[in-house]
């Protein structure tokens, strides 16, 4: 797998709740290489932020760039193929993972963007996914199998940045370690609820979301305290509290 080094920037990203209050606001991110981790309480807007970055949800404030070009300048389908979102839970799909892969490869934007991809079956094999599982129907796969297959497809398409929403939440410790090892070579923004995982994988900074009017910008790699929480020093540099 190769990693490209395009620069992604987000400036002043904000999203409102339906009542007009701010879910989060003033989120700044800059990264070109490595793993940027995002943490924060449940419901603070981590998944929504990833969807805003991927342009599947319209944000209320802020601007995004990849190599100094906005999503509109890239064109939204190209943007989404370069900054690719892998959801927390795969929607129940028809058919098998191989059927899905065939469909993804047939999208014009993917055909144009890259002529060769990595082999997702090989990537997933390293994570304990037997090749025959690619022929199984999605609805017969376990949560952990679905999670690894979706991740392997995302990795194989070699986007500039992968947006990962708790990508190891359904995995046992051993599978999680294998996935972390592979993904440490990929440029990604990774939402995690696990402070120890954030500490292990964060190589391009950390964003601790608090929600509300002022959310903040990334800080250097988080330092979990003995209790496993992100420590106060790291917390205070991550965010400006409302
Ligand atoms: N398109 C949208 N517009 C406005 N608010 C939304 C939208 N989609 C989801 N929300 C709301 O945003 C809030 C945060 O949800 P989100 O899933 O982003 O949180 P999260 O921090 O990822 O939570 P968790 O850690 O539990 O996965 C929820 O109250 C949800 O209803």
Image (cartoon, rainbow, N blue to C red):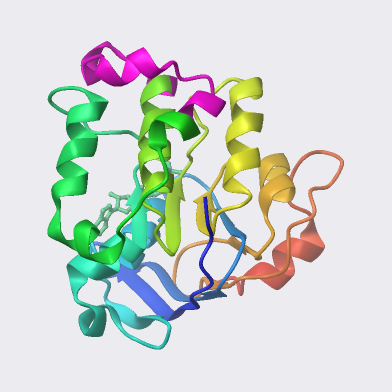
Residue in the image at 38% along x and 58% along y: 50
Spot the residue most to the front: 115
In the picture, measured across the screen, residue 36 lies left or right of residue 80, that is: right
The residue nearer to you, when weighing 209 against 141, is 141
In the picture, measured across the screen, residue 21 lies left or right of residue 43, that is: left
For the C terminus, the quadrant is bottom right
Q: Where is residue 151 in the image (x, y as percent from the top left)?
A: 42, 39
Does the magenta portion include 105? Answer: no
Q: Position of residue 160 (x, y in %)?
A: 43, 64
Q: How many marks?
A: 0
In the picture, measured across the screen, residue 95 lies left or right of residue 81, that is: left
In the image, residue 229 above or below residue 207:
above
Q: Where is residue 120 in the image (x, y as percent from the top left)?
A: 40, 36
**Image quadrant in which you'd find residue 145:** top left
Spot the residue most to the bottom: 68
Can residue 69 be seen in the rendering of this structure?
yes
Can residue 44 be seen in the rendering of this structure?
no
What is the chief secondary structure element of the magenta stretch? helix
In the image, residue 228 above or below residue 26:
above
In the image, residue 27 above or below residue 167:
below
Q: Position of residue 129 (x, y in %)?
A: 46, 20
Residue in the image at 45% along x and 48% along y: 164
Residue in the image at 82% along x and 38% along y: 227
In the image, residue 115 above or below residue 178:
below
**Image quadrant in which you'd find residue 38:** bottom right
Range shown magenta: 124-144
Residue in the image at 65% along x and 65% along y: 204
């Amino acid at each position: 797998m190769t990693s490209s080094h395009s620069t992604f920037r987000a400036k002043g990203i904000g999203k409102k709740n339906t009542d007009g209050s701010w879910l989060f606001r003033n989120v700044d991110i800059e990264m070109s290489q490595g793993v940027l981790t995002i943490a924060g309480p449940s419901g603070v807007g981590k998944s929504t932020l990833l969807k805003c970055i991927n342009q599947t949800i319209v944000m209320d404030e802020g601007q995004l760039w990849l190599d100094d070009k906005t999503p509109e300048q890239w064109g939204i389908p190209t943007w989404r193929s370069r900054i690719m979102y892998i959801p927390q839970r795969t929607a129940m799909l028809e058919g098998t993972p191989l059927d899905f892969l065939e469909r993804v490869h047939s999208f014009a934007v993917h055909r144009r963007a890259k002529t060769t991809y990595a082999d997702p079956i090989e990537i997933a094999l390293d994570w304990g996914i037997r090749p025959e599982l690619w022929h199984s129907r999605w609805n017969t796969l376990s949560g952990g199998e679905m999670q690894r297959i979706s991740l392997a497809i995302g990795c194989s398409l070699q986007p500039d940045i992968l947006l990962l929403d708790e990508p190891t939440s359904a995995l046992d410790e051993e599978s999680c370690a294998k996935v972390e090892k592979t993904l440490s070579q990929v440029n990604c923004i990774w939402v995690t609820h696990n402070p120890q995982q954030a500490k292990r994988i964060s190589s391009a900074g950390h964003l601790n979301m608090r929600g509300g009017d002022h959310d903040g910008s990334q800080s250097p790699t988080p330092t979990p305290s003995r209790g496993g929480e992100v420590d106060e020093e790291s917390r205070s540099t991550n965010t400006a509290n409302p």
